Every structure is written in C-alpha cells, then in structure tokens.
Amino acid sequence: MTLSERAALFGIHLTAEQIAQFETYARLLVEWNAQVNLTAITDPEGVEVRHFLDSLSVVKALTPRAGVRMIDVGTGAGFPGLPLAIAFPDIHMMLMEATGKKITFLQEVITALGLKNSDTLHARAEDAGHLPEHRARYDVVLARAVARMPALLEYLLPLAKVGGLAIALKGVTAQEEANDARRALSILGGKLQAIHTLALPGVPDAHALVVVEKVAHTPNGYPRKPGVPTRKPL
Ligand code: SAM
C-alpha cells in the first residue's frame, strides 16, 4: 500500500507535492540517523506506518481547522507534529524539543521541505510552560512517547488554552495511565474527554489517543521545576 492510500484510510488526501515532502523527510531521517540518534525505525515501511501514519492518526480525535495553533512536546525527530504540518498546511505547528541536535535536524527538514507553517522551540516543557509566549497559548497540545500520563499532563496542560485539547498518543497502557492521571487532571484543570483506540495497517499492538480538554486555568506553580513532574508525578 502506498502512503497516499494509507493516509486515505484516515480521510487524508495528499497531493503529489506532499508525497514528495514525506519522501524527502524519510530520506533525511535515515541520513541524519547515522550521526544523531533519532529513531530505531529506519526501514521505509516502518517509517511510513509507525512514524508518518501513526502521527496522522491524530485526525481520529480532531479535525485540524485552518489557523489552529498546535504544539508537539518532546517531538524528537518530529513525531507527531511534522507529518501533521505536512498534511495540513493551514495549521500552525510548534515543534518543542529539549535536545539541541534534534532541533537542528528539525530545522533542516523544515527548510528542505519549504514548510511555512512550522517552527521549532528548543526548550524543556517545564520551562516553556511558564513563558508568557507559550503558556495557555495553544489550541491543541500533542505528545507521543515522552512520559507517563500524570507527568505528561503537567507538561501539556499549562501550554493549552482553556477550551483547548491535550492529545497523547499511547499504546496498550492508555486506559491504565488515564486512570492513574485522575489527580493530575483535577489539579491541572483537565477533564478526560475520550480514549480513541485504533489500528494501524500491519501493526499488531493497540494504539490509542487519550484526549483531555482543558476546562480550567492551570495553577501558577505548574509545571514544577525540571525533572520534578517525572520524579514526583501528581
Ligand atoms: N515524540 C517523538 C516520537 O514519538 O518519535 C520522540 C519520542 S522520544 C522517546 C522522547 C523525546 O522527548 C526525546 O527527544 C526527549 O529529548 C524529549 N523530552 C523528554 N522530556 C522532555 C521535556 N521535559 N521537555 C521537552 N522535551 C522532552
């Protein structure tokens, strides 16, 4: 199956230019991976399904409207933020990452693809969550494979506007992590909206999107200092 056919399964129709952008991204990912540790998945099929399609699966939880401001926290080599930015040129995507070399890679990809809707932010979530230009500024806050749910919500919810969403891409532990996050949700101003389970073609393990709505302001003391959210999760 081609990437175009796979994306169509999620109702996403890619142009020839967007397909070419995905091809360039995949090539740069594999090239850079020889120098910078970006991903364990480098075979073309794996990159397409486990990185590109997995990222695009976010559309099962939300329709990216034009002008929506999204941030991907701990984006690594750009997942899920960059595939979404390629597929939806009318959204705005901020790619946040703590590791400088990964930021350099992301900037290279943005330039090579000519993406006008994406920016990078070299920061830790615990710091960015207190900066006026980022705190409560995003309609949608995303993350994949960054932390367990209670700590992750402390990274994500301060960045979301009240009425905005935090979406975590999770695996089999989605429900259990959501249960463990009840206290974090009530402290940080979040409300569990839904857990969408979905299948990726040819991938046996379960995949889920945990969707949390920000229903109240996050108290000023959160996020706590770098390292504390994971060391002492709420
Ligand atoms: N989201 C990408 C993916 O799914 O392929 C990368 C996942 S990788 C396992 C976790 C990434 O989150 C790393 O690149 C790490 O540097 C970043 N990260 C971890 N904690 C972070 C924090 N507190 N603030 C910003 N980035 C963080």
Image: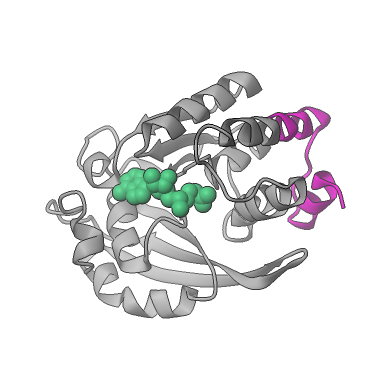
Pick out the residue farthest to the front: 34
Q: Residue at x 78, y 27 (%)?
A: 17
- 57 vs 147, left or right, is right
x and y, in percent, of residue 220 in the image: 13, 51
Measuring from the top left, give residue 170's x and y in whole percent. Answer: 51, 65
Say if 57 sits above or below 177 in the image: above
Predominant SS along the magenta part: helix
Query: In the rendering, at what x and y percent does residue 177 appear?
Result: 40, 75
Residue ID at (40%, 75%): 178
Instruction: Tell me: residue 165, above or below residue 174.
Output: above
Find the magenta span and give its range. 1-24
Q: Decide whether residue 157 is among the magenta residues.
A: no
Residue 33 visible in this rendered orientation of the protein: yes
Q: What residue sits 71% from the left and 29% below the top? A: 24
Q: Which quadrant holds the C terminus?
A: bottom left
- Residue 6 is one of the magenta-drawn residues: yes
Location of residue 147 by image quarter:
bottom left
x and y, in percent, of residue 231 in the image: 21, 63
Residue reaching furthest to the left? 221
Q: Is residue 216 left or right of residue 25?
A: left
Q: Is residue 138 left or right of residue 117?
A: left
